[in-house]
């Protein structure tokens, strides 16, 4: 079955399954094995696992490339960074996912890369830097400022300059954009988030444009030892089956609440690209009190689960100082929008009381 023949929402339900022969299970089984009988294609559990391969088939089709899964989004990000030569000139967003931003800064401070950071919305500034760079790391929309990059323009320019491009597609997901189709070399995902969707596992993935790039990443996974467990691969694939209906419901909740938050007296600024399942608000009064006083919304880090969840990002000491102290990131789940609104509205009112 070729993914090009099917709508992605059909592909995600149908792919990654054993052949349809009598008495074969319809779901890829969990294969708990560290080693395999010699002489075959797998041999050892750090090389591959059938449960991981089933998930990779589904994910690769969704992003129009070849997928490889890792034990977390950060493990996937580190495998990509491990491909760069010493001294590589890297352009990255000023505000990106905290772990990625901190890691890039570390590599720069150790003299392993030469890092230049840019606002991802400053298309011309990035284009001007490309001829003198080797790697362009993009995230769009960014976490947690929800800035949107002009991906098609940037990726086309990077290609003509021979710059390797990586797009962290965690927020948009393949439901809303396919960076490989726009010309990216690699797409990065925190599978922990909306792809698996149930806040019950940690996982990352890279989807590569071509087989040579995939092979290099496979070697990194083997050598860095960043293989996810078979059980987590099973759960992630089960979650991925419902990606489209979860994404669409979460997004419609986001759109519905954003329109009410826009005119809320205690919301000083609202950030939302007009689509997607994540928004951010800057609030009057105590942002911590708002987070602590919800009853339905979960106060916790992370995002992309079926449950709506909120967090003041600057409570983390390593979060970029470009993120306002009073910014609360909102991850919309699939509950009823009326329940979400009543709870958030009440928390915003109680949080602003001195
Ligand atoms: C969470 C996240 C990551 C890191 O993924 P983990 O699975 O937590 O290691 C990377 N990028 C973005 C945009 C994220 O939200």
Image (cartoon, rainbow, N blue to C red):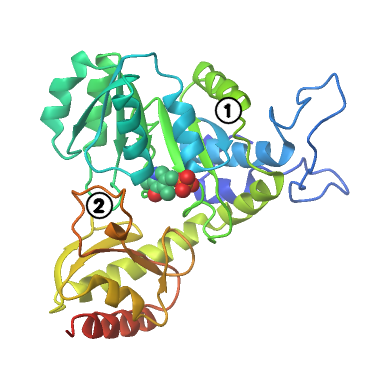
Is residue 170 among what the camera can see?
no
Query: Which quadrant would the N terminus be assigned to in this image?
Result: top right
Mark 2 residue crowding within 10 angstroms, few (<14) / some (14–19) / many (20+): many
Q: Quadrant of residue 117?
A: top left
- Check the image and report above or below for 260 versus 255: below
Question: Could you tell me residue 199's position as x and y percent?
Answer: 53, 60
Locate residue 181, reporting x and y percent: 38, 31
Q: CA distance from mark 2 to mark 1?
A: 31 Å
Label 2 or label 1, whichever comes before in sequence order: 2
Label 2 element class: loop
Name the residue at 27% across, 58% down. 314
Quick one: SS at disc 1? helix
Q: Residue at position x 39%, y 38% from top?
A: 178
Residue lying at 39% horizontally and 13% vertically, measured from the top left: 85
Asked whether the viewer can see residue 178, the reply is: yes
Residue holding disc 1: 224
Residue 145 badge: none
Disc 1 packing (10 Å; few <14; some 14–19; many ≥20): some
User: Residue 276 at what x, y percent from top left?
Assistant: 33, 56
Quarter holding the C terminus?
bottom left
Residue 313: x and y in percent read: 30, 58
Q: Residue at x 35, y 70 (%)?
A: 253
- Left/right of residue 188 with respect to residue 199 in the rendered view: left
Q: Nearer the viewer, residue 295 or 156?
A: 295
Query: Is 299 left, or right, of 10 in this rendering?
Result: left
Residue behind mark 2? 146
| 280 or 294: nearer the viewer | 294
**Residues at marks 2 and 1 touching, judged by CB atoms closer than 8 Å:** no
């Amino acid at each position: 079955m070729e993914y090009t023949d099917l709508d992605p929402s059909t592909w995600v339900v149908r792919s990654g399954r054993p052949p349809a022969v009598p008495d074969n299970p319809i779901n890829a089984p969990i294969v708990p094995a560290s080693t395999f009988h010699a002489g075959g294609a797998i041999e050892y559990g750090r090389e591959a696992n059938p449960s991981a391969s089933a998930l990779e088939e589904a994910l690769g089709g969704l992003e129009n490339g070849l997928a490889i899964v890792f034990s977390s989004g950060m493990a996937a990000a580190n495998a990509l960074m491990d491909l760069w030569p010493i001294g590589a000139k890297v352009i990255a967003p000023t505000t990106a996912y905290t772990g990625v931003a901190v890691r890039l800064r570390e590599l720069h401070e150790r003299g392993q890369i030469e890092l230049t950071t840019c606002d991802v919305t400053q298309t011309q500034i990035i284009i001007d830097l490309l001829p003198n760079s080797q790697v362009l790391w993009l995230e769009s929309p960014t976490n947690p400022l929800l800035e949107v990059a002009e991906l098609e323009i940037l990726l086309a320019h990077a290609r003509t300059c021979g710059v390797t491009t990586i797009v962290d597609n965690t927020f948009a997901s393949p439901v809303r954009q396919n960076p490989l189709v726009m010309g990216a070399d690699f797409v990065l995902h925190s599978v922990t988030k909306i792809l698996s969707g149930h806040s019950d596992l940690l996982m990352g993935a890279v989807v590569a444009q071509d087989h040579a790039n995939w092979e290099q990443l496979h070697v990194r996974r083997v050598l860095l030892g960043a293989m996810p467990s078979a059980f987590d691969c099973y759960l992630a694939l089960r979650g991925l089956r419902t990606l489209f209906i979860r994404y669409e419901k979460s997004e419609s909740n986001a759109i519905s609440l954003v329109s009410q938050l826009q005119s809320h007296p205690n919301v000083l600024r609202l950030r939302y690209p007009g689509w997607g399942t994540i928004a951010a608000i800057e609030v009057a009064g105590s942002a911590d009190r708002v987070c602590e006083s919800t009853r339905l919304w979960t106060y916790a880090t992370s995002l992309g689960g079926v449950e709506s969840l909120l967090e003041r990002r600057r409570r983390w000491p390593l979060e970029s100082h470009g993120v306002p102290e009073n910014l609360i990131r909102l991850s919309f789940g699939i509950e009823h929008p009326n329940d979400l609104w009543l709870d958030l509205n009440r928390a915003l009112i109680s949080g602003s009381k001195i």
